[in-house]
Image (cartoon, grey):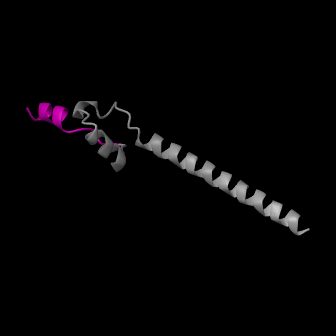
């Protein structure tokens, strides 16, 4: 009887981060599907970090270009 309860109501949390567990509960994933369900939060975080990094590099390049123009005008 307890085995049936554990299978259907207590999810497998091994190898999951707290953020992934939170996402799965928010999406109301059944306990027996936790092990096979892929959480998207880590992928979204990686994409966001890449976007921020690209934006910072772009801003840095723009500042470098402006400083080069200023230096040219001083000469």
**12 and 63: which one is in front?**
63
Which region is colored magenta?
1-14
Q: Residue furthest right?
A: 75
Q: Image quadrant of residue 41? A: top left
Q: Residue furthest bottom?
A: 74
Is residue 59 within the magenta segment? no
**65 and 57: which one is in front?**
65
Q: Position of residue 32 (x, y in %)?
A: 24, 31
**55 and 15: which one is in front?**
55
Quarter of the picture containing the C terminus is: bottom right
Is residue 11 within the magenta segment? yes
Q: Is residue 23 above or below residue 59?
A: above
**33 and 63: which one is in front?**
63
Taking the spot 38% from the left edge, 37% from the top edge, the residue there is: 39
Taking the spot 10% from the left edge, 35% from the top edge, the residue there is: 2
Q: Position of residue 21 (x, y in %)?
A: 31, 44
Quarter of the picture containing the N terminus is: top left
Q: Image quadrant of residue 30? A: top left
Q: Residue furthest front?
A: 73
Q: Is residue 73 above or below residue 22?
A: below
Taking the spot 56% from the left edge, 51% from the top edge, the residue there is: 52
Q: Position of residue 40 (x, y in %)?
A: 41, 38
Q: Image quadrant of residue 61? A: bottom right
Taking the spot 29% from the left edge, 34% from the top edge, the residue there is: 34
User: Total of numbered circles in the picture?
Assistant: 0
Q: Residue furthest left?
A: 1
């Amino acid at each position: 009887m307890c085995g049936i309860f554990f299978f259907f109501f207590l999810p497998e949390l091994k190898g999951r981060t707290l953020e992934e567990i939170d996402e799965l509960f928010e999406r109301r994933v059944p306990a027996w599907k936790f092990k096979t369900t892929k959480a998207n939060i880590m992928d979204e975080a990686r994409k966001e970090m890449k976007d921020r990094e690209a934006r910072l590099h772009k801003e840095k390049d723009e500042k470098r270009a402006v400083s080069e123009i200023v230096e040219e005008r001083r000469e």
